[in-house]
Image (spheres, grey):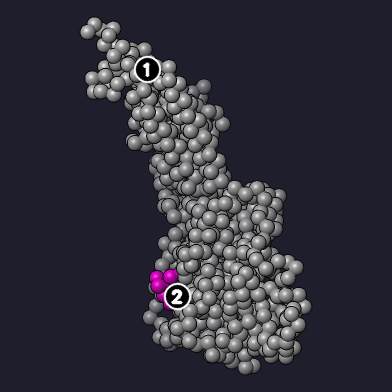
Amino acid sequence: MNDRQAELTASDKELWEWIPTGEFRLPSATIQTTFKTRVQSFLKLYQKTPSENSDGFSSPEKLEYLSSFILDRLVPAVEWKLHGQSLDSVLVPWCGSPDKKFVLILNVPHSGNAGILRHWAAEHGFRVIDPPNLSGLLKSSDDVWFKQFENSNSCWVLPNLERLYLRHEAGLRIIQRFFRMLLAGELGFGVVGCSSWAWSFFRHAMGIFAPISMVAKPFDSSKLAQWLGAMACGTSRRKILFRQSDNGRMVLSSESSGSANKDKTVDPDPFFRDLAAFSYGIPGVALAYWRASLQAEPDTLDLEKNTDETTSGQSTNHSTVWVKPWINIEKPDLPKNVGRHHAFILHSLLLHDMLDMDMLKKLLPVPYPQIGQTLYDLSDNGVIEFVDDQWRVSPKGYPVARGFLKTEGFLTDDFS
Amino acid sequence: MNPSDQISGVFANLNEAAVIQIIIIIAAAISLIIFFRKIFSWIADKLTGRYRLYTLASVPVLRFLIIILAVVMIIPRIVEPTFENLVAVLGALGLALGFAFKDYASSLIAGVVTLYEIPYRVGDWIEIDGAYGEVKSINMRTVEIVTPGDTVVVIPHIKLWDRLIFNANDGTPNLQCSADFYLHPRHDGSRVRNALTDVALTSPFLKLENPVKVIAKEEPWGTLYRIRAYPVYPGDQFEFVSDLTIRGRATLIKLGVEFASVPSNVWGKKA
């Protein structure tokens, strides 16, 4: 484990807190942003063409987006295994003497909780049980899969319960049997991780109730600033300053955000408050928007150099990364022709985490060509993405998709 | 004072200038009504869900307020606004309307009543005198509905007085749908109910927050099973029922359940 990982692990417990689902509270945005966003979205309804970007001196001639190499250095992918320890305080005491049949860990999309749970199980040597192949869920025999629970005296972990059902008349059989046996105590005791959307479906469709259900506390502005700052810390020999491109305001500094940044009395920049509110406090979503907000002056950002040269020719011992103002960050839009098919597909993807096109055809009464067209519409707009041969709602598209489905009257998860 | 002097006294203010002002007020009121109807329809087209319904429902209320305002502005330009004059003019007007345009006036009054009793709003699915459809607009005298067969039916508000008005969703997005299955009496009832419940729960049209019920009832030729559930979009009711029917039927066939059929001797009698 290198120094950077050790540092992240030290702050892990502070960042990843687990709370009972009833105590979940979303972070709120600044009043100015809420007002501006509402006005902007209202005006957008009546704009024939999208308005051009007008963010002060962050014109394309002066600022450009970071290369993926530098971006990956400044904002690397999250290593979920580093955060597995955070579950100890919640699960270790229970696993020792379980008086309830199961503990539910809810995974809000892109929160990474399923990954954390999987790594936690591996660290403690608990059996990880994976659901069968999705297409197998529609077949009649499921005895083989349930054999895994036989003679189970120790705790098991099922990190992805949402992959144990299909919203199809033949796809509820295994999950119904699973709940029946689980509640009857025939499966021993275990930790169940489930997508918050799928759990909402189970709760409404089957009346399932979890005796203990926990969820990761949403990241508020302070946590986001601390987390993203810690990521940038140690990526360069020099201090990295993150400054807002329209007014030069200091948003974050790698030095102050590293190990020294434990002073919670210092308010984080309003940018993070808006980021936390818009992303529902979900780390994966916030990370995607943070990456999309970073820019630099052409050929000025070299993380390996000891000194940097500004456009005016002066040498400095820090690098500046420019952060787009929150209101100017491009957010995915729903297609102009958005309708029922888009809603059905987005809802299905969120209920099942991810699906391929063939499975969508089995679940939806939508003609195959229209499923394809709708998927490409949503993909072109950045609302969904193609990962591991399956479609899923993208991190940047999640707030948009969630808001759309809620307005349309579809069942959402409980975290709004 | 003779009667003609009295009448001329009542309409003392009605001169050429007053007539022009009245025409301007009427023209302005009509323009405003048209303007608001168009602008609200335009806004509603951009909105979805309940916001669309609220926007559309506010059009008749706004129109009523504009008309009241116009009448209040016109009356002082026609008559001296004293109590006696108003009673005389409104009484005469009422008498004339009562005889000549009884049904028309009754529909107009019923139109006003609909604004506060709200038996239907734009977006509701209603049935009056056998005509079923979605309310598209509520005018002063009539309500316009569009049937599932894409036919516009214009129904005068006068029906409000003495006809049953069935409102399937009553201003909410909750519209209950039913899908019926007639089965041969020899079957496992609880398996059928569970299977049909799963069929409803797995329909993408289903509004999951609302309850799903499967009721059973013995009929002369078999057992009737009825799924009662709500679609997310009230406008999808027919597609929803079709989806439930097709998938429900396929599921029951897989279960090996026999469907009820009318005995041949009954058909024989009918023929």
Which residue position holds label 2?
A: A214
In percent of the image, x 49 and y 45: which residue is there? Answer: B52
Q: Position of residue A206 (x, y in %)?
A: 45, 61
- Residue B123 coordinates in the image, percent (x, y): 47, 39
Q: Quadrant of the N terminus of chain B?
A: top left
Mark 2 and mark 1, same subunit?
A: no
Dot 1 falls on which chain?
B
Image-based side of B222 in relation to A391, left or right: left
Looking at the image, which residue is at 67% across and 86% down? A318
Q: Which residue corresponds to the image point at 67% horizontal and 80% vertical from the top-left?
A: A320
Q: Around disc 2, counting alpha carbons within 10 Å, would you say few (fewer than 14), some (14 to 19), or many (20 or more)?
A: many
CA gap, disc 2 and disc 1:
78 Å
Residue in the foreground of this view, choosing between B210 and A174: B210
Q: Nearer the viewer, mark 2 or mark 1?
A: 1
- Above or below: residue B233 compared with residue A383: above
Image vertical order of residue A240 relative to residue A246, above or below: below
Label 1 sits on residue: B14
Q: Where does the magenta region start and end? A: A19-26
**Residue B193: image location, x then y, percent:** 45, 51
Q: Residue at x 47, y 25 (%)?
A: B24
